[in-house]
Image (cartoon, rainbow, N blue to C red):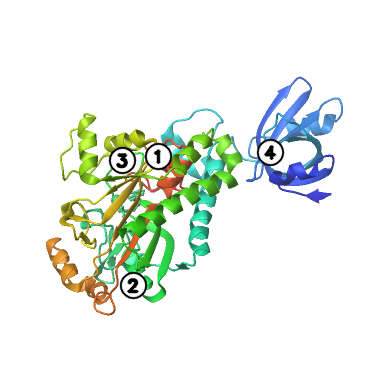
Amino acid sequence: MASIMISEAHDHLGHSVTLKGWLYNRRSSGKILFLQFRDGTGVLQAVVSEPENPELFAASARLPRETSVIVSGTLREDRRAPSGCEMQLTALQVVHEPTSDFPIELKEQTPGFLLDHRHLWIRTGRQVPILRVRDAAFRAFRAFFHERGFVATEAPILTGASVEGTTTLFELDYFGDKAYLSQSGQLYLEATAMALGRVYWVGPAFRAEKSKTRKHVTEFWIAEAEMAFYDHDANLALQEDLVRYLVETVVGERGDDLAALERDTDRLLAEVREPFARLDYGDAIALLKGKGHAVEFGDDFGAPEEETLGTHFGRPVFIERFPVSMKPFYMKRDPKDPSRVLAADLIAPEGYGEIIGGSQRVDSEAELVSQLEENKLPRAPYEWYIDLRRYGSVPHSGFGMGLERVITWICGAAHIREVIPFPRQIHRLYP
Ligand code: 4AD
Ligand code: MG
C-alpha cells in the first residue's frame, strides 16, 4: 500500500493508501462519521459508516482533535471536496492522543488568545496556506536573482553602526562595547557588490519600532539586492520586474492556497500586469493635499497617505526623489536638484503600504563624509564603508523589500503578524 501525502491523493484515485497526520476536525451525520485529516500539504476527508465498520466507527468517534494518526483507506473522486477526493477509511492507528482539549477552536477567537497560542494556532485555518505562500515567496525571490546571474551573499546581524537611523536600533552589550542588531544588510551588500558585481540576500532585520500598526513587526525578513553600475532608473526597472515575477510565480504555484484564503488573484495579477506608476515626491504631496490629507512638503507618509496613493493608482506606485532631510545618509543626491535624493519607495495597492525602499548610493568620498556629518553620525564606525569610495568607486544602487509586507499583500491578510511564524512586536516576545 502506497504511503502518500494529502497533496498527492488525487493521483491515487481508486487505490488503497496510507497517510500520516493529525485529526483536524470531525462531524457526524447519523451513522456516518466524517473525519478530516491534515498533514501540512492539505486536508483530506475520510468517511466511516457504523453499520459497515462498527469497531472503527467507535474508535474514531471518540478521538479528540489533533490526535496524531496513521490511517489507511481507499480514495475515490469527490468533486465537492477541496482535495478533489475522499477516503473510505479502513484502518486507524493512534500515534498520540492529546491529554486535553486542543485550545484553538475552528471558530473566532480573540487575536490576543490566538497570538499567545501561536505555536498551536499555526496548525489551523488560514495559517497553513499563509505559511505555504510565504515559502513560495521566499523561493521566488531567490529564484529571480539566481536566474539573472546575481550572487547570493550574507550580511552580519551583529553590527557596530546604524543604517536606517539611530531611533529604531536594538542595542546590546558586546563584551563591554555597544553593538546593534542589524536594521538592513545594505552597507555590507554594497561591499560585496564591489567584489561580486550584483548580489542579493534574504535575512532578518530588526527595528525597535514603537509603532503598533498592521504593518510593523520588530523582527522581519528583508530581501535586498545591490548592483554595481546600476543607476536610479535601472534600479526601479529591476524592482518592477521582481515584484511582477514574485506575484505571478506565487499565484502560479500557490493558487490553491490563495483560493483557500479567498484572495482575488485576478485582481492581484491585474495590479502588477501594467507598468507601475511613478510619481515625484512633490507631486505625491500635491495629490494627497487635493484629496484632503493634511500633509506638507517634507512630511513622511503615514498609513492613510499610503492607502490613498495605493488606491488611487490601483497598482504599485513608486514615489521618488524625496527631500534630502527625509532620508538616510547614504543616498545620492539628484544632480539636477541637490535638495532631493535619487531614492524611491514602492507602495503596494489596496492599502498594504510601502513594500520596498531603495536608492542610488553616494559614490564620492567627499559627499559621503559630509552627509555623515550632516546626519551627526560618528565617522569611525563607517571608515570601512568610506573605503568603498576610495578604491574604484562606481555608481551603484540597491533596494530592500519587506517580505512580510509583500506576503501580507499577496495573501490579502489583515495583519502582518499573521504572515510570519512567530511575530515579534513591542509587547510580544512569547511564544
Ligand atoms: O525602507 P527601509 O527602511 O530601507 C532599508 O532598510 C534600506 N537599507 C534597504 C536597501 O536599500 N537595501 O526598509 C526596507 C523595507 C520597507 O520598504 C518595508 O517593506 C520593510 O523593509 N520594513 C518593515 N517590515 C515590517 N516591519 C517593519 N518594522 C519594517 N520596517 C521596514
Ligand atoms: Mg522605507
State how far apart marks 3 and 2 are (Cα).
34 Å
Does any portion of residue 79 appear in the rendered image? Answer: yes
- Up/down of 96 relative to 108, above or below: below
Left or right: 145 in relation to 66? left
Residue 191 — which label? Answer: 2
- Up/down of 35 relative to 141, above or below: above
Q: Quadrant of residue 44?
A: top right
Comes first in the chain, label 1 or label 2: 2
Q: Nearer the viewer, residue 91 or 218?
A: 218
Q: Residues within 10 Å of mark 1 (few under 14, many from 20)?
A: many
Residue 212 — which label? Answer: 3
Residue type at mark 1 is Arg
| Residue 79 rendering spot, x and y as whole percentages | 73, 31
Residue type at mark 2 is Ala
Give the total of numbered labels. 4
Comes first in the chain, label 3 or label 4: 4
State how far apart marks 1 and 2 are (Cα).
34 Å
Q: Nearer the viewer, residue 308 or 4?
A: 308
Residue beneath label 1, please?
315
Residue beneath label 4, please?
37
Q: Quadrant of residue 12?
A: top right
Comes first in the chain, label 2 or label 4: 4
Callout 3: helix, strand or loop? loop
